Amino acid sequence: MFGVASALGVASYMSSGRAAVGGASTRARAPAMKWDVDIAPWELDYGLQRSPVRLPDGVEIGDPPQPFEVTDEQRRALYEDGAIVIPGVLNKEWIEYLRDATDWQVEHPHFWSIAGVASGLYDYIQRSVWASNGAFADFMYYSPVASALAGSVGAKELRLATDLLMVNPNKGFKWHQDNQNGPIDSFGEPGANEWTSLRWWVTMDDCPPDHGAPVYLKGSHRNEKVTSEAVFVDLERDGLLAYPELLEFRPRAGDLIVWHARSIHKIDGPKSQDWDESRRRVLGGTVAIDDAKYMAGGRLLFSDMGSHGMEDGDLLNHALFPKLYPCSDPAERAEAAAGRCTRTWEGVTRMWGGLFKSMAEMSSFANVVNLGAADRGRK
């Protein structure tokens, strides 16, 4: 649900530690968002971070992800409807772990978040948080999320293609599909090789009663009219009125939402554009399923800004896109822990090289954000 704003601050990844501080008299007022997110350059972290959280009892480094059983009914609903909510994937310990990791991240913003926070679309948003903060990497390696995702489609292997930490969406997002899914074929072919990836959210807070609920067009993952380059969609023009039934999910803390990248959906933010005392903290992303191939296709991809040497058609087999299921890879974990899964000038140059090819996608994204104008299509 987020793309363009993150592009504004991706070119620098640079060294660890704090930015150099000039004299106090030369400092401009530090910009901050409603949840006290201070994005002054001299207050940001630029290198590896680790939220000071402990793994839940019984979880050891190197373990496979904790198990979670998905029912046949849930699998059928995903295949038929294109989106499901799986209740209770995270227990109380994992919820507290992820909340504490997130709250610490918001209090210690990373440079990779600066453009998204400054945009005002969210109180805090950061892509590739797993690569910059070891606590989120451990969550992906060891929590039950990977087991639940694998069980949803009977996957033999899952790799993380992209992730996104999102706190309090303030603008809302109109009807759209997701296509910032990493350098993979995330859409597949309707009716054939349909399930090549999964989109997912895991929620840390109960959804408010009157806003913040994701709404999907049931069965719209089977549509063949919306191109893979599109983000924003027009329900009438794109033939989506053929999917009149809505799926509105109001997840509770610890629930997991899973959907096909082609599923059309929206989310309405608070009318006041302020969550007051409430929170909507979500960790989400895309996983690639079974023998996925690297398929950047020259596109502008915000999760593909590292150095890896892969070319289109190669197996997606690199620490930058870590294996999560059936078990994380110790060599890949070591690469991430050593800070070698970060953005590089080579990767950033490759990413910007895809700007022209992705102009239609970027233009489409500009229409998906609710900036207060009347929403097109069904409310």
Image (cartoon, rainbow, N blue to C red):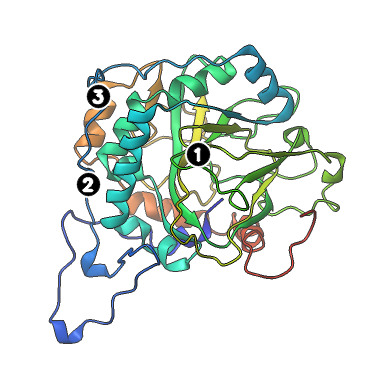
Is label 2 or label 3 in front? 2
Q: Position of residue 78 (x, y in %)?
A: 66, 25
Q: Point out the tag, 1 or 3, that comes first from the N-terminus.
A: 1
Residue at the image position 34 percent from the left and 56 percent from the top: 112
Residue 152 rendering spot, x and y as whole percentages: 57, 20
Mark before the other along the chain sequence, 2 or 1: 2
Left or right side of 100 for 370: right
371 and 291: which is toward the camera: 371
Find the residue positioned furthest to the left.
23
Whole-percent x and y of residue 362? 60, 59
Observer able to see residue 193? no
Residue with the mark numbered 3: 331
- Residue nearer the viewer, 142 or 111: 142
Which amino acid type is marked by label 3? Answer: Ala
Label 2: few (<14), some or many (≥20) within 10 Å?
many
Q: Mark 2: which amino acid? A: Gln
Residue 323 sits in which quadrant? top left
The residue identified by callout 1 is 183
Camera-side mark, 2 or 1 = 2
Q: Are marks 2 and 3 in contact (CB under 8 Å)?
A: no
Rounded to the nearest whole Å, what is the CA distance between mark 2 and mark 3? 20 Å
Q: Position of residue 366 (x, y in %)?
A: 62, 63
- Amino acid residing under circle 1: Pro
Q: Residue at x 53, y 47 (%)?
A: 298
Front residue of 297/269: it is: 269
- Determine whether, in the image, residue 90 is placed left or right of residue 367: left
> Residue 49: which numbered mark, if any?
2
